Image (cartoon, rainbow, N blue to C red):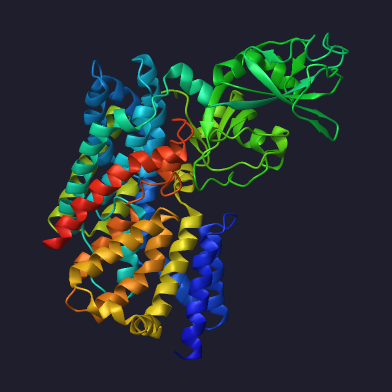
Amino acid sequence: MDTPTLFLFLLYAGVIVALFVKPIKPAQAFGVGALVLVFSRQISAAELLATLTTPSLLILFLLMVIAGGVHRRLGLAQALQRWTQGVGTKGFLLRVLPATALLSALLNNTAVVALLVGPVRQWARRNKYAPSTFLMPIAFAATLGGMLTAIGTSTNLVLNGLLEENGLPILHTSDYLIPGFWVVWVGILVMVLFASRQLPKHLTENLEKSREYTVETRVVAGSALLGKTVQEAGLRQVHGLFLVELVRGDRVIAPVSPTETVEAGDRLFFAGALEEVRELTRSNPGLALPQEELTQGAASSAMVEVMIPPGSDLVGAQVRTSQFRQRYDAAIVAVHRRGERMQGRIGNIHLQAGDLLLLIAGPRHAELMADSKHLYSLSSQAPIAPLSRQNRALLILGSVGLTSAYVVGYLDFLTVLVAAVALLGRVGWLGWNDVKKSLDWELMVVLMSALAFSKVLMNSGGMESLLDMLPFMNDLSPFTSVVLIFVLTTVLTNLMTNVATVALLFPLVAALLHAQPAIHPMAGYLALAFGASNAFLTPFGYQTNLMVMGPGAYQPQDYLRFGTWVTLAYSAALLTYLYFL
């Protein structure tokens, strides 16, 4: 192996290692790797930037924009209530999971899950079921539905971008539809059968206990609590909340002794369920929230629960420096993090994906939330005003016209999407704020860098050299090689992001298919695509998995226990199809 090829392999290995380092984001790992390629003159800056104009990636960006403008206007909460009236657990799953999968085949699955979490929890509580029985299946159904079409998930479009950039035939929706249909229905059937048996049953009261929030309060000057011990002041438990920590200046007292004397300015940290936190913040004469005006307005202000989704710019930010109050006209009262008891002042907390926050909201909070993709509300939202009769007719006629033009071959898909963006803008369903909210700039960096890496690795011939160093690969049957691709992709996608998995494995898969002509290329690339979405074993395997972890009060073992059944069913359905391909 020559020196330039060895350099590329070391850089490639460095990116892989960086993806497993927790503080490093995929965009940072791939971005730095791409810059090294540019400065080492493996690829020019113009070629790097030109990857963003690959038709498959342009389609991905436009679909993200369209989905961002449409999904909030679908009225899913109202439709869910009508569609599931009077049904039980299995009836609910049989109605909602197929609908979720179909929506996810056309819309961004993260947005679909975000819209459904609140209404599903409300339906479960209203009908005295455990929300934890439904939320994980909803997230998994969205992942399954993404495999029905070539545009259903970003990994499918990224794979097409990689194929296109390297002059290889792309995969179409017709290639995904049949295997996608089988994995969707087999996966849904397994979830309907096993959800009640394998998932924890956190009923309403138990769910609130398992979703423990930590709330920070301050002892006000002149309080009747001053000079009393914790026991005398009745602070061991307040409204059902347990006192877990006391901060006095720079001194942290934990656990808090019942004989500890209360002093002015003491910071008291209580832990407890959501409703108990609400009661504490409404009225207590001796305690105040960290900001005085919040305590005064707590009784009259709206209190809402929100979630930080994966990819949010709030991930990793310290509350104190995040300008949260200015951005969302709301202040964080309490934090819940996947069963972990939070310590220290709320202002010092570094936020993470999946965190649930309890907020006291100001008058502009709902408006600011509507324009943000960095925070999802779990509380019920006000319905959006319907279209006027004229705009509704224009939207229907325009949609029919564009669809017909595409079906008869008059317009290509990219042109249809550009026209659809213009149409949605005309009827008021898409604005500049929707565009800003919908585009994921970190994903764009990952995709641009991944295409550059793939192009350089493919042109260098390094992957062929790697296969030559693995002679046992030549002794495998074509189907065994396909299974190997699928299994390797499945393992990696449960440990890192699906886009990163496709980007890293594509050069190796392409080289393997080139070296073994007996392997059907479509079988190899479908194994890669479906393996990248076979992420049901960990909460971090797919972003929708993490989104339901807090609201469902799940533990990592819940994903492994329930996800194993879905993984086995998904794998069996896909590999059976590929065997006969």
The picture places residue 339, in percent across and down from the top left corner, at 55, 33
Residue in view at x 26 percent, y 61 percent: 527
* Image quarter (top left, top right, bottom left or bottom right) of the N terminus: bottom left
Left or right side of 48 for 82: left
Left or right side of 572 for 306: right
Residue in view at x 56 percent, y 62 percent: 28
The picture places residue 21, in percent across and down from the top left corner, at 56, 59
Q: Residue furthest bottom?
A: 2
Left or right side of 534 for 355: right
198 versus 174 height, above or below? above
Q: Looking at the image, which is closer to me, 397 or 49? A: 49
| Total numbered badges shown on the rendered structure | 0
Q: Looking at the image, which is closer to me, 243 or 119? A: 243
The picture places residue 282, in percent across and down from the top left corner, at 65, 13
Is residue 399 among what the camera can see? yes
* Image quarter (top left, top right, bottom left or bottom right) of the C terminus: bottom left
Is residue 174 among what the camera can see? no
271 versus 565 height, above or below? above
Q: Looking at the image, which is closer to me, 159 or 537? A: 537
Left or right side of 266 for 542: left
392 versus 91 height, above or below? below
Residue in view at x 71 percent, y 42 percent: 321
The picture places residue 36, in percent across and down from the top left corner, at 56, 76
Residue in view at x 54 percent, y 78 percent: 38
Q: Looking at the image, which is closer to me, 398 or 161? A: 161
Residue 345 picture quarter: top right
